[in-house]
Amino acid sequence: MICLVLAILAHAFQTALTGIHERTFIAIKPDGVQRRLVGEIIRRFEQKGFKLIGMKLMQASEDLLRDHYFDLKDRPFYNRLVKDMASSPLVAMVWQGLNVVKTARNMLGETDPAHSAPGTIRGDFCIEVSRNVIHGSDSVESAIREVSLWFHSDELVCWDDCAETWLYE
């Protein structure tokens, strides 16, 4: 019940959940879905110890994607990015855990796969920057905005994770 109240307050007032309740938005892009990498990517986040609290397979509208990528609107690749992201289904997810935003970014690797280390998602599965398989929030503030853009509070499931005592002191 406390988790549900915290989720509603965070969503309503756009405040960050901190500590083990920190959240991030992760999207497996259309190229990752088409290449059947969804299970492998989810496996990596689960094995790390993060808790999945929201997930949906969806066809994102161009309007939603324009809102999501508003900070890139002046870049020459913006229109192509929006069209590519709207071209096929994607998997939108919310993950929760201690330092999940920073850790997830490290797990993803660099935006340009050529600079991504082996062992990262992009380092292992990507070759070209325009087909880099996955998106992850780049800050706690971005995570709050992106989670609220892609999910309604009733789509996030707070649940007791029995492994939590084995992950956190």
Image (tube, rainbow, N blue to C red):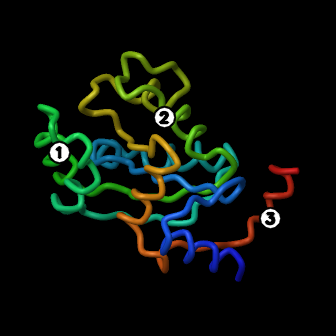
Discs 3, 1 touching: Cβ within 8 Å: no
Specify which label sits upstream in the sequence, 2 or 1. 1
Task: Place residue 58 in its image quadrant.
Answer: bottom left
Q: Is residue 56 above or below residue 45?
A: below
How far apart are labels 3 and 1 at the CA level?
A: 39 Å
The number of numbered discs placed on residues in the rendered structure image is: 3
Q: Is residue 113 above or below residue 14?
A: above
Residue 84, label in figure: 1
Q: Is residue 59 above or below residue 168?
A: below
Q: Which residue is drawn at the image coordinates 23% and 40% (left, top)?
A: 72
Q: Secondary structure at mark 1?
A: helix
Three-letter code for the amino acid on which mark 1 is drawn: Asp
Specify which label sits upstream in the sequence, 3 or 1. 1
Residue 74, how many percent across, how many down? 15, 37
Q: Is residue 50 above or below residue 80?
A: below
Front residue of this view, candidates 39 and 167? 167
Q: Residues within 10 Å of mark 3 (few under 14, many from 20)?
A: few
In the picture of the structure, the residue carrying the numbered disc 3 is 162
How far apart are labels 2 and 1 at the CA level?
A: 19 Å
Q: Secondary structure at mark 2?
A: helix
Residue 108, label in figure: 2
Q: Residues within 10 Å of mark 2 (few under 14, many from 20)?
A: many
Q: Which residue is drawn at the image coordinates 67% and 59% (left, top)?
A: 21
Three-letter code for the amino acid on which mark 2 is drawn: Leu
